[in-house]
Image: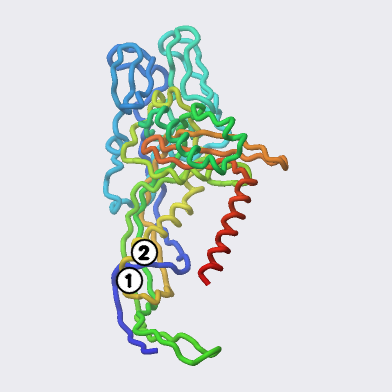
Amino acid sequence: MREQSRQEADTGYAPGEEPAIDYEEHDGPAVIHTDSAVKDGLNKCERCGSTEISLNVAKGTLRCHYCRHEWQEASAVEEFDLDTPISALDGITIGSGSAALVPGTDEVVSFKCSACGAEVVIDTEHAMQARCHWCRNTLSMNQQIPNGAVPDAVLPFSLPKDEAVGRISKFANSRKFFAHRKFLAEFTPENVIGVYLPYLIVDVNASMSLQGMGEHKLRQYTVGSDDNKRTVYDADVYQVARQFDLYVDDLTIESSSDKLNIDTSHNTNNIINTIMPFDTKNIVRFDANYLSGFSSQRRDTNVDNVSDIVLRQTRDIGRHQMLPTLRHYDRGVRWEQEGFEVKGQRWVSAYLPVWLYSYYEEKRNGKKLLHYIAVNGRTGETMGSIPINNRRLLIASAIAQVFGTIAAVLFL
């Protein structure tokens, strides 16, 4: 093998071992106060003062049920300056709705109705609004308490329920041949529910550096004969160096522990990841009225709990972006040194919209499995799982194997 030493500096791909992560020292996270000027209680229509407000899914606006006036909350990106350059991020910045959860925080909140003075209770585990039992006004929970119920922002549904039902039906029907007969008999796509799921959205300012050896093939030939035959490669060997800044925009991470800690023996909620991405640039300031008529799941995971996931994904993004610069090294690159430095991070929490259809399968051995079909509430991207008719699947596999054997014999 011929060897030729050359020094390069560019951007490249790093499939080697994971590097140690360097953190720049900072005094503590800076906080974006996303709850400023937000109050619990009566969220009134700006035109007529009614509290009967809900989301108009078709337009993505809030609509007053009384005077039909429509409006939209301010863009969270503009309101909270989330569009400042990622390259300028230094240290950790978090939205106040992304602050660490405080164990023992009461999920049941009581406050006074500002219309009639009655005490109204909201169980934030199950709802963000309640109707005053005296004056019948709708009261909303908007202030952030450290139990994860109120995020920094929300991405409203824009895909109507009937479209979600159609997509779920199409998904299931395309798989009906192998679907379990009981599932087909009980399939009721109209039972789909709209759910706001909790996510953490993060921008990352980082840098990567790598050093190693790359090989470029000159020729390939065979030597020896019979059992001693072998293939030999001649290649140039290069010293390769890559160093670059990495800016990751709106990396979206689940902040519900039951989605992070996937247990496929009990449910198939891992399919939620397959309907991403969401158009997170369109998130708006949180208003409980966006949740009216929908379900929601509060955040129960802190930023610290998902930091390693974010850094690992950021590093993987960097490695992937380097791929085009290594095409010359068709024999591969062996990285011997790798560095990864995090300069700044910016975190906000948000509710993102998902249409969910669930089906509880009870197998003959007594095991139970919860299946989901999920539809992105913005883009309509659909994915899911359905119970399988194992007998039909085995028969189809056997037939395919027989035909494969026959085809192999015919072409001998």
Q: Amino acid at mark 2?
A: Met
Residue 188: mark: none
**Residues tagged 1 and 2 counted as in contact (Cβ below 8 A):** no
Name which quarter of the figure residue 135 lies in: top left
- Secondary structure found at label 1: loop
- Reply above or below: 62 against 247: above
In terms of sequence position, does the residue under pointer 1 or pointer 2 come before the other?
2
**Depth order, front residue of 29/378:** 378
Tell me residue 209's x, y (percent): 36, 67
- Secondary structure found at label 2: strand
Whether residue 351 is visible, yes or no, is: no
Q: Amino acid at mark 1?
A: Arg
Tell me residue 174's x, y (percent): 48, 41
Residue 327: mark: 1
> Which residue occupies 43% across, 55% down?
313
**Quarter of the N terminus within the rendering:** bottom left
- Reply above or below: 186 against 199: above
**Residues packed near mark 2 inside 10 Å, few (<14), some (14 to 19) or many (20 plus):** many
- Reply above or below: 277 against 136: below
Residue to which mark 2 is pinned: 208
